Image (cartoon, rainbow, N blue to C red):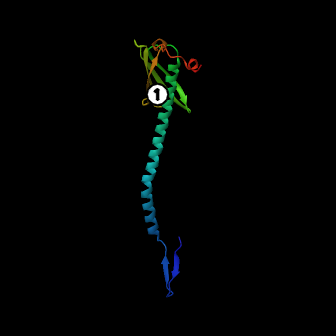
Amino acid sequence: MGMLFVRCAKGQRIEAGFSLVETVAALGILAMAAIPLLQISTDATRNTAALETRLLARTVGENVLNRALALPTSLDAGLRSGLEMQMGRTFSYTLNVSPLGEDGLQGLEVLVREDRDGATVSARLISLKATLQALPADTSDEPSGTEAQQ
């Protein structure tokens, strides 16, 4: 690094610029300030990955619940499990179906885990399934929308 020489009014040369020691000290201070910024960036990336996993696991759980709810009949009580791909990642799910109650409702619980670790539950969804016999019949005396318009 070259030094800049400046001549003053009296004709003397004055050295201007930073010495090597000053430059190294400035770089050290800058590096110490950058370390917390890198840590924040690393934490943000880790949190984003965890949120993505939870979102994909929730999507898998919603798909499993919707397939179970779409069936017209009640489900056999017990556990069902399987694998499902979501955005190129494999998730395992467990569907726990409770016995049909007197009210015609069944409890459904889905636990979803990412297949690579399998230990941590990434999503847990709970719902109730009503069977056709449990739904109330339409006993209203009001005319339907098309009859009321005529």
Q: Residue furthest front?
A: 150
Q: List x then y, in percent, for residue 59.
A: 51, 30
**Circle 1 residues within 10 Å: few <14, some 14–19, many ≥20:** many
Residue closer to the observer: 61 or 90: 61
Q: Quadrant of the C terminus?
A: top right
Above or below, 21 against 94 in this view is: below
Residue closer to the observer: 134 or 70: 134
Q: List x then y, in percent, for residue 88.
A: 56, 32
Residue closer to the observer: 86 or 7: 86
Which residue is depicted at the point 46% across and 17% down?
130
Which residue is depicted at the point 53% across and 73% down?
2
Above or below, 63 against 27 in this view is: above
Name the image quarter holding residue 124.
top left
Q: Which residue is identified by label 1?
A: 112
Q: List x then y, in percent, for residue 22.
A: 44, 68
Instruction: Report the number of numbered marks.
Output: 1
Which residue is depicted at the point 55% across and 28% down?
85
Q: Residue furthest bottom?
A: 10
Q: Residue furthest right?
A: 150
Amino acid type for the residue under numbered disc 1: Val
Q: Is residue 150 left or right of residue 140?
A: right
Residue closer to the observer: 24 or 79: 79
* Element assignment for label 1: strand
Name the image quarter holding residue 24.
bottom left
Which residue is depicted at the point 42% across and 61% down?
29
Q: Residue furthest left?
A: 102
